[in-house]
Structures are given as structure tokens and as C-alpha cells.
Image (cartoon, grey):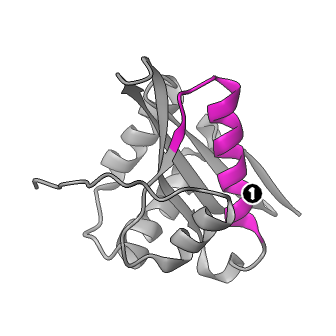
Amino acid sequence: MVVIRQAVETDRERLATLMQEYIVKFCEQPAPSRKALTLHIKRLLNNPSYGIQFVAELEGKLVGFATVYVSWSTYYFKETAILKDLYVSPLNRGNKIGERLFKICLAYSQKYEFAGMTAECSSENKVAQNLYQKMNGKENAGVQYRFF
């Protein structure tokens, strides 16, 4: 049975391995250093005002994760959540783990009365877009620009 829960300190090494898989194999980006990954995870664990990570665990192995970062909405003058990363390892897809990770992120954002939660993904990531539409997400009319 898959357990969805907040990441804890003892997850740090396993979560770093899963995040590296996501970054390198799924996002096709260069591998960050192991030290940088574990420091990032530690920063989130120790400072929930920056963000939070949730994990999906199956038989002692992490098979998915989601990262929600905290930002600020001047418009609503409240904190807002940004779901930047939601990943399920390929062998464990199709079992609604992604939906469950999404739902815990949304519940967290609602529990702490954030102004809202925005989910970001690349324009090519149709799987994520379909999930967010299934979860009743509304596509933003705004435009984002990236500078580097």
C-alpha cells in the first residue's frame, strides 16, 4: 500500500535520489551535486516558510514526491503556494499516486489558508496538464517570461 506523507529528515537521502532521477531522466537537465540536493531538502525540512515536500512511499521505497514552494500574493496580501514539482517513478505510474500527491499539496495549501495554489509544468508535459485539468485547475490567462 502506498503511503502519502510529509517528508521527514530520514527521507533526505532517498528523496535526493528520487529528485535526481526526476531532474536528469524526466526533465533532461544536468545532475545537480548530491550535496546541493540534500542541502535543498534540508532547507525545506527546516524552514517550512520556504516550502514543503510530500513523498509517496511503497514498501520502504520512495516512489514519488511533490514540492510546494511558498510565495506571496500582493493582490490578495496572503501567502500563496506554487506546486513546482510532482513526480512519480515510471514503474509506479497509473496507480493514482500523482493524484494523491496533488491532493495532499492542495489540502496543505487550504489548511494554511493560502491565497491559492498554482501548479506549474512545461508546455510539453501533457500528463501533468491532464492531471491538473482533472483536478479542476483553471489555466491561467497570464503569461510568464523566463530570463535565464
Q: Is residue 40 visible?
A: yes
* In the depicted structure, whether residue 56 falls above or below residue 42: below
Q: Residues within 10 Å of mark 1 (few under 14, many from 20)?
A: some
Query: Residue beneath label 1, please?
Result: 100
Q: What amino acid does circle 1 point to?
A: Arg
Q: Is residue 103 left or right of residue 123?
A: right
Q: Residue shown at 68%/59% (left/top)? A: 135
Where in the figure is residue 57, as x and y percent of width and height?
A: 74, 58
Q: Residue shown at 68%/67% (left/top)? A: 134
* In the depicted structure, whether residue 12 falls above or below residue 70: below
Q: Residue shown at 38%/79% (left/top)? A: 124
Q: Is residue 6 visible?
A: no
- Describe the element under mark 1 as helix, strand or loop: helix
32 and 135: which is toward the camera: 135
Magenta segment: 96-117
Q: Is residue 19 left or right of residue 93?
A: left
Q: Is residue 25 left or right of residue 114?
A: left
Quarter of the rendering containing residue 105: top right
For this orientation, the residue located farthest to the right is: 1
Where in the figure is residue 27, as x and y percent of width and height?
A: 36, 72
Check the picture and name the quadrant holding the N terminus. bottom right
Where in the figure is residue 62, as x and y percent of width and height?
A: 66, 60
**Is residue 122 in the magenta section?**
no
For this orientation, the residue located farthest to the left is: 147
